[in-house]
Amino acid sequence: MSEVRFDDRVAVVTGAGGGLGREYALLLASRGCKVVVNDLGGAMDGTGSGTTAAEKVVQEIKDAGIPVIVADRRPDVSEDMYVTFIGSDFVEEGRRAARWLAEKMNGKANILELQGTPGSAPAIDRKKGFEEILKDHPGMKIVLSQSGDFTRAGGKQAMEAFLKSPVGRTANALFAHNDDMALGAIQAIEEAGLKPGKDIIIVS
């Protein structure tokens, strides 16, 4: 769903990867507005060519001479196509989760991983940061990894599958890419007769 909010000559455009969002963005560009394009990170054109819908929109706005500020997630475009990015450092979030877990587990853990939506910037970057720190801890390894799609239901379903697996039952730690999946996993752990935070240490 597309939405545009105005504040002086600045417009916040949500959903500018396609549909009305794209039309709004180009209209605003023609009027000389500065445009904040929000959440273009997931706007894919589905062609598999590596070109995103976001890239097409940002390029057309840039060609009109309008500066683009990206918020929340980085789109899959060259950084020289926008002025700046305002959002979280997902790689560092992954690093911090791994550092905490390494200290908590004394550098030894069989880890289950609940990934976010495949192809999304948070999922890719949090995993990257987490695994970067694991390289310094040979006693810690991810034994199973599955997407929970950033949802509580998805986290619960994936955790249930983990706990039915012989490999999954050897795990004593869980890294979830967000809190919703961790909450779903906690429910699955409890229903399996285990104690979250004791039998399986959780970080998200």
Image (tube, rainbow, N blue to C red):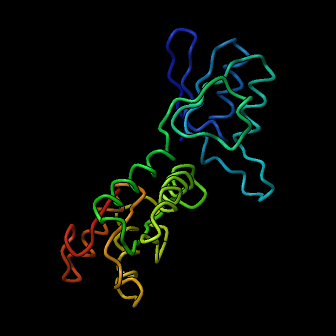
Q: Nearer the viewer, residue 109 or 145?
A: 109
Quadrant in the rendering for residue 112: bottom left
**Would residue 36 appear left or right of 66 to someone viewing this image?**
left
Residue 54 screen position, x and y as percent? 69, 40
Q: Nearer the viewer, residue 159 or 20?
A: 159
* Quadrant showing the C terminus: bottom left
Q: Residue at x 78, y 48 (%)?
A: 51
Residue projecting furthest to the bottom: 166
Q: Residue at x 47, y 38 (%)?
A: 88
Query: Is 51 drawn above or below residue 111 in the view shown?
Result: above
Query: Is 147 drawn above or below residue 52 in the view shown?
Result: below
Residue projecting furthest to the top: 8
Quadrant in the rendering for residue 196: bottom left
Residue 185 screen position, x and y as percent? 31, 69
Query: Total number of numbered labels?
Result: 0
Query: Is 162 drawn above or below residue 176 in the view shown?
Result: below
Residue 197 screen position, x and y as percent? 21, 67
Q: Residue at x 45, y 52 (%)?
A: 94
Residue 167 screen position, x and y as percent? 42, 86
